[in-house]
Image: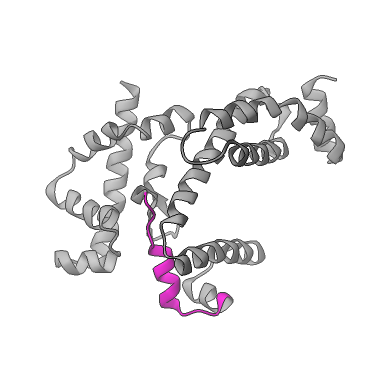
Amino acid sequence: MEDSELFRQYRETKDVAVRNKIVEKYLYIAAVLAKKFVGRGVEYDDLYQVACLALIKGVERFDESKGLKFSTFITPTITGEIKNYFRDRSRLIHLPRRVAELRVSLKKASDEILSQTGKKPTVKQLAERLHVSEEEIVRAMEAGGVVSLDRTTEKEDDEGMNFYDILASDDGALESFENRDAIMSAVKGLNETERTILDYRFRQELSQTETARRMGVSQMYVSRMERKILEKLRTQLSKDMAD
């Protein structure tokens, strides 16, 4: 049976046996991509498990009617999941245990509230759900990882942006991010005030409030400048990758 027919059948029936048949057919891609990341401090078996879970989720999401080959669709999907695993793992193992555990609980509680209400939860809602203070919630949210570029910025529309978001979504762009020279080159294009905000927020991992206090400006000013800086970096990186 051809792939398109298998996917059509699964989309219509949601038969787990059909899904497993598709997964088994493409396990080799999960294996190849997992091996690509061996040697970075994580065992192959763990990477393979992450890749397999991404493969299953990919089968669930794939729409054969769009004419895209599944292999083309699933490769960047699995690669992205593995990179996210490294990013999350690095962040958690370098945080105090209490903060790391709270961040895990925060993610779960946030997903649950979003699922129940259709809206992103407030700090107060999360604090009530987890029976901790709002201050602890904020601290956990602001806790940075080893890769400080993971840090999320605050936006007026509550749609957070981080340094990963300033890059295009294709795998080539992600590979470009791993080249720190590209980041450093883009940062050189910032003025002194922008570099100061970048240093306080993403290297020293200060809150917007503390950054504003040190600079003698308002928190809103820092927030607006932060969005402007990220957009400027995104534009410059996109331009560099196109050259």
Which residue is at 25% across, 57% downward? Answer: 204
Q: Give the quadrant of residue 175.
A: top left
> Image point 23% across, 57% down: which residue?
200
Q: Is residue 73 left or right of residue 171?
A: right
* Quadrant occupied by the C terminus: top left
* Picture layout, residue 55 above or below residue 201: above
Choose top left, top right, bottom left or bottom right for residue 181. Answer: top left
Instruction: Check the image and report above or below for 117 versus 237.
Output: below
Q: Quadrant of the N terminus?
A: top right
Residue 134 magenta-highlighted: yes
Q: Position of residue 43 (x, y in %)?
A: 56, 39
Q: Nearer the viewer, residue 212 or 50?
A: 50
Q: Could you tell me which residue is drawn at 49 percent across and 50 percent down? A: 89
Look at the picture and state if 99 lies above or below 28: below
Image side of residue 210 versus residue 132, left or right: left
Q: Is residue 120 visible?
A: no
Magenta residues, start to end: 130-146
In this figure, which colouring scheme has been used for the structure?
one colour
Of residues 239 and 52, the one nearer the viewer is 52
Q: Position of residue 77 (x, y in %)?
A: 58, 34
Asked if residue 92 shows in the view, the reply is yes
Q: Position of residue 33 (x, y in %)?
A: 57, 29
Tell which of 158 and 202 is nearer to you: 202
**Residue shown at 58%/36% (left/top)?**
44
Q: How many marks?
A: 0
Residue 190 image point, x, y percent: 18, 43
In this picture, residue 79 sits left or right of residue 40: right
Left/right placement of residue 84 relative to residue 220 reads right
